Amino acid sequence: MATAIVGGEVVDGDVDVVDGEIAAVGLPGPGAGVAIPGLVDLQVNGYAGHDVSAASPDELLELGAALARDGVLWYQPTVVTGAVDDMCAALGRIAEAVARPPGRRARILGAHLEGPFISAGRAGAHEPGHIRDPSKEILDRLLGTPCPVTQMTLAPELAGAFELIEELVRRRVGVSLGHTDADATFAHAAFDAGARSVTHLYNAMRPFWHRDPGIAGAALVRDDVVVGVIADGIHLAGEALLVAWRAARHRLVVVSDAMAAAGKGDGIHKLGPIDVTVVDGIARTWDGSLAGAARPLLDGVRLLVTLGVPLAEAVAAVTSTPASLLGREGIAGLRPGAPADVVVLDDELRLRDVLVGGSPVG
């Protein structure tokens, strides 16, 4: 390689891999392209024809293999709003997948629960009939499966939401605000209570307005909030992405929000309990609402760079920043002694090779 992204900076030279670990960076020699850490995706609803909420353990392993082929080496399988029994069952299957040997696949960081405590008015592609008011009993059921839950998206304006935020923080589950009609006052209070991120900024939330900035405005002005965005060229205009980057420059996280169609193509696919139609790579429900995304996470890196974001910062948004949000700073870095989980891009930032522990992903 000609360069590598190391510690958030572009370092000239090649990366040496010995016995599955990174031995050195910045080595002289001819080369082309750039080496970056394996990508970290905090919101994967499905991939390669498999829906996380319905996938068997074997299918989750296939999903992880497909993610790895596209450069994602760590991820949060995201269970969307559904019947509570079905959500618990999905978490049980994820736990079974976690218990399997990792192989050369994307590794599971823990589950992301996107619902069921969200706003019916900002449901997006979530099934309204399964949305629930905040309930400690339901939360206990969801957190009581063998699957580690690492993040939960909820709407803070709902009655009882702050009690759940307190409980989630106590249990060391990351709280993200999303699918919400919260105004800025509610948002600030929730962030003060321990929420640390927002789920897909701008989408499925109260719109930003100059006299009613809502949750988006509150998140963008706070240095203690990580801002998640979907950078697929569909969910957000370029200007909206740049506003988010300039306001939250070193706390921006790009997620794929991928659903089963990602890596599979157009057609009818599942997103939790609902059917989603994908046409020309755009996923929509029967009423025209956007329903997740059908593009790999690496597309978001290329889009940010096209918009003028420095490559090192675009890479951080899919590696070190999401890892830090989950307290997993030890992953997604190129440094001597670390496992050789490496993504190699060509000079056009197209995927060339993926290594897991120094071994190529097939």
Image (cartoon, rainbow, N blue to C red):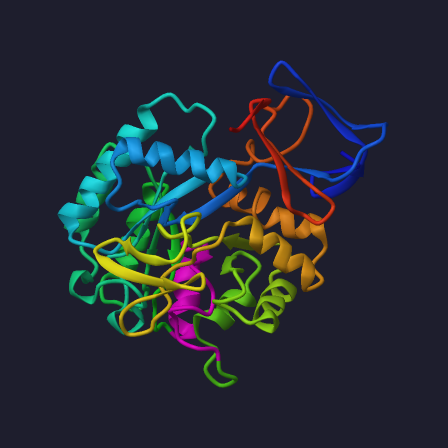
Looking at the rendered structure, the number of numbered marks drawn on it comes to 0
Q: Residue at x 44, y 75 (%)?
A: 214
88 versus 261 height, above or below? above
Quick one: quadrant of the N terminus? Answer: top right
Query: Where does residue 170 sit, x and y in percent of width and height?
Result: 33, 44
As for residue 144 lying within the magenta part, the answer is no
**In this view of the protein, which residue sits in the foreground, 166 or 286?**
286
Q: Nearer the viewer, residue 42 or 31?
A: 31
351 relative to 53 in the view: left or right: right
Determine the residue positioned at 21% across, 48% down.
139
Q: Is residue 109 visible?
A: no
Query: 310 or 133, which is in the foreground?
Result: 310
Identify which residue is drawn at 20% across, 62% down: 131
Q: Position of residue 89 (x, y in %)?
A: 18, 40
Q: Where's residue 146, x and y in %?
A: 24, 32
Task: Determine which quarter of the picture holds residue 177.
Answer: bottom left
Q: Is residue 36 above or below residue 362?
A: below
Residue extending furthest toward the bottom:
211
Q: Quadrant of residue 289?
A: bottom left
Q: Quadrant of residue 123?
A: bottom left
Residue 33 at x, y percent in the picture: 74, 40
Q: Is residue 195 magenta?
A: yes
Residue farthest to the top? 19
Magenta span = 183-208
Q: Is residue 296 visible?
A: yes
